[in-house]
Image (spheres, grey):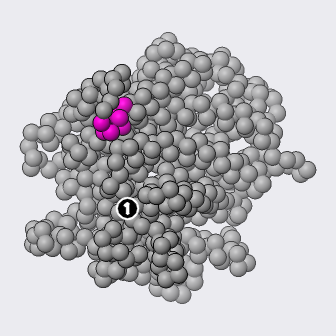
């Protein structure tokens, strides 16, 4: 791209970033509307990109053809938007600064908790106010409840908190970016992982050969059959809701709980008996490898049957067994990933102190130093926060494990709605004697959970690895620049997005319907607080059956890994275990099953030709649901602006929250 083209891309990308950082908090939390940037196909980014290719480009093509955005420009703009979508909600700021404020409030309102925190010697700099029993917390209280009369927003305490936490977050981001860029060439070029989401992204861009400003996908009749059908279905659902049943709705899924009221079926998981189908998951299943799609839905269903039988016929049944197996599988699969890429990691380690002569090696060297700088920064910051040497190292390792696993899951499956539900430090710390722990380590473990497992729903490594190759022609030099650009976007977004959240909290204090503003995000440190109290009170409880569950889960995961590597036709992949029992698998399993069945039928009865010709149909299902989500997110906003009672408007949730 020329200098003028690059400048125009950066200007448009900056406008898109501001839109995402400002619109997301107000839409998600103040309006209590459907979320718009909380998955790996962020609706806000897709909507902004489609405005460029379907509205701006056609106008420019008529009025000023030389300014039409080409494929590479649109790809880079979308890459910038992907990176911007990390921060404003589930990727970080839904929890920060809300959890910090709520924790400060809870500590000062509870003498017992305040004494525990004091004994743990947690630094005061982590909080916006002085912590201690019965001390006032106006800064935190007013963020959670709204400003008092004749008061102004207290920016100064939050700037100090932003600096302290920003150093740690920058270290975490460097680790994630380095991990994503290191693993990208290994997984894409050597292991040949499919990265299904890239197919979705790239179909939104203009084609480089035909010269048309409208992407070919949007001129395909089959695509519009799929997208139009989905949009009509959701139009009926939306009109049914907003007209109070005057328009007939359209049920999607099934509700069979009333038919399963006797043993053993009453113990079947609710996620099996009551299901909503998602067209985006049906479409994504079409682009997944068959074994991946089958493994996710079959493992979810098989474990539901296992738990049902256990609860009915073998009481008392240990309900934590599914969580234990999932955590064990994560550790086992991580070891497998590192083993398969051992030569690649050895090569990266050798490049760190060598002079590189090729661009691919230069990418790996830069990414390697990012990873090292991030890991060392995390370790040093946690040592400053009072975390012992051993636990600081373990927390860095857990962060790296979560980053690697979520990047692998999305690279193999293309799941847009997923996160790591496991590898939480407190899960493992609870298995150890209290004497092996420290109060600071327990408390900081809560924030490690917040920044890595919880925020993995919109993970930096996933976004940077996809942003780096959204453009098929991106060179390693371009990918290095993407990594640097990601750092800049995260830092700027942290300040701007954080300021928007603070302004929203202080000026409103509740949703437009009068409900608590962002309650879920503000309470994510509750478990860590309770564990700190138990540790200081001498009431530390070690679960008795967890180790056995982990050992059996390790054996199952190891067997699946060996079978998958040795037998190409083996149907079960261990990725199913990584998601089993999680909210994300429970939401998606039925849609993935339907998509998998359709794909198998098309391939078996129509062959490769039928598979290629029906790809636009399934792409239409994905984008049709995203189009519908964008449309029906706007409807409540418009109705409220027109004067309707916000408490009566409501919303329809299209994509999972």
Residue 10 in the image: above or below residue 446? below
Element under label 1?
Answer: helix
**Side of 503 where 383 appears, left or right:** left
Residue positioned 74% across, 51% down in the render: 503
**Side of 19 where 107 appears, left or right:** right
Residue 129 in the image: above or below residue 577? above
Residue positioned 65% across, 44% down in the render: 495
Which quadrant holds the N terminus? Answer: bottom left
Looking at the rendering, the stretch of residues picked out in magenta corresponds to 358-365
Q: Is residue 361 magenta?
A: yes
Q: Which residue is mark 1?
A: 201
Query: Closer to the camera, 442 or 30?
Result: 30
**Side of 261 where 163 appears, left or right:** right
- Dot 1 crowding, Cα within 10 Å, few <14, some 14–19, many 20+: some
User: Which residue occupies the extreme right position in the image?
Assistant: 150
Question: Which image quadrant is residue 139 in?
Answer: top right
Q: Is residue 283 magenta?
A: no
Question: Which image quadrant is residue 70 in?
Answer: bottom left
Instruction: List x then y, in percent, for residue 276.
Output: 39, 66
């Amino acid at each position: 791209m020329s200098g003028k083209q690059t400048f125009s891309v950066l200007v448009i990308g900056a406008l898109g970033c501001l839109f995402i950082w400002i619109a997301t908090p107000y839409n998600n939390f103040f309006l209590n509307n459907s979320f718009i940037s909380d998955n790996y196909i962020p609706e806000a980014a897709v909507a902004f990109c489609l405005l460029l290719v379907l509205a701006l480009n056609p106008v420019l093509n008529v009025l000023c053809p030389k300014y039409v955005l080409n494929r590479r420009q649109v790809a880079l703009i979308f890459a910038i938007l992907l990176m911007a979508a990390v921060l404003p909600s589930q990727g970080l700021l839904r929890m920060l600064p809300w959890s910090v404020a709520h924790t400060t409030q809870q500590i000062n309102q509870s003498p017992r908790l305040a004494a525990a925190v004091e004994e743990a010697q947690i630094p005061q700099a982590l909080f916006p106010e002085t912590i201690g029993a019965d001390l006032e917390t106006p800064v935190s209280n007013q963020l959670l409840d709204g400003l008092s009369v004749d008061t102004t927003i207290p920016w100064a305490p939050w700037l100090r908190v932003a600096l302290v936490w920003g150093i740690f977050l920058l270290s975490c981001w460097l680790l994630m970016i380095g991990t994503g860029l290191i693993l990208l060439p290994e997984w894409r070029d050597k292991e040949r992982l499919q990265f299904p989401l890239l197919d979705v992204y790239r179909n939104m861009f203009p084609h480089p050969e035909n010269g048309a400003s409208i992407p070919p996908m949007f001129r395909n009749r089959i695509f519009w059959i799929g997208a139009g059908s989905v949009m009509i279905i959701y139009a009926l659902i939306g009109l049914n809701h907003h007209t109070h049943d005057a328009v007939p709705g359209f049920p999607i899924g099934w509700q069979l709980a009333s038919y399963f009221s006797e043993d053993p079926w009453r113990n079947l998981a609710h996620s099996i008996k009551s299901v909503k189908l998602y067209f985006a998951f049906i479409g994504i299943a079409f682009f997944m490898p068959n074994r991946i799609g089958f493994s996710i839905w079959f493992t979810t269903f098989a474990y539901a049957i296992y738990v049902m039988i256990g609860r009915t016929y073998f009481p008392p049944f240990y309900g934590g067994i599914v969580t234990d197996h999932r955590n064990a599988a994560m550790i086992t699969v991580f070891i497998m990933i590192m083993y398969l890429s051992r030569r690649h990691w050895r090569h990266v380690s050798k490049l760190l102190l060598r002079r590189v002569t090729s661009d691919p090696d230069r990418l790996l060297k830069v990414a390697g130093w990012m990873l090292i700088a991030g890991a060392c920064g995390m370790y040093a910051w946690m040592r400053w926060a009072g975390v012992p040497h051993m636990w600081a190292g373990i927390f860095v390792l857990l962060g790296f494990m979560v980053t690697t696993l979520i990047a692998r899951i999305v690279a193999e499956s293309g799941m847009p709605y997923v996160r790591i539900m496991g590898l939480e430090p407190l899960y493992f710390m609870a298995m150890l004697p209290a004497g092996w722990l420290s109060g600071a380590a327990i408390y900081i473990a809560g924030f490690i959970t917040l920044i890595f497992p919880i925020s993995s729903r919109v993970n930096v490594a996933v976004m940077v690895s996809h942003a780096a190759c959204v453009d098929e022609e991106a060179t390693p030099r371009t990918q290095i620049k993407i990594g640097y650009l990601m750092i800049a976007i995260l830092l700027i977004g942290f300040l701007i997005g954080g300021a928007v959240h603070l302004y929203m909290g202080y000026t409103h204090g509740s949703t437009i319907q009068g409900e608590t503003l962002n309650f879920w995000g503000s309470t994510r440190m509750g478990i860590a607080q309770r564990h700190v109290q138990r540790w200081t009170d001498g009431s530390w409880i070690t679960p008795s059956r967890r180790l056995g569950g982990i050992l059996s889960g390790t054996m199952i995961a190891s067997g699946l890994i060996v079978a998958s590597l040795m037998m190409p036709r083996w149907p079960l992949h261990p990725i199913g275990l990584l998601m089993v029992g999680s909210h994300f698998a429970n939401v998606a399993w039925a849609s993935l099953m339907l998509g998998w069945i359709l794909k198998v039928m098309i391939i078996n009865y129509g062959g490769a030709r039928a598979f290629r010709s029906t790809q636009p149909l399934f792409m239409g299902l994905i984008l049709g649901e995203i189009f519908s989500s964008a449309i029906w997110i706007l409807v409540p906003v418009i109705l409220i602006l027109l004067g309707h009672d916000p408490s009566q408007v409501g919303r329809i949730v299209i994509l999972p929250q």
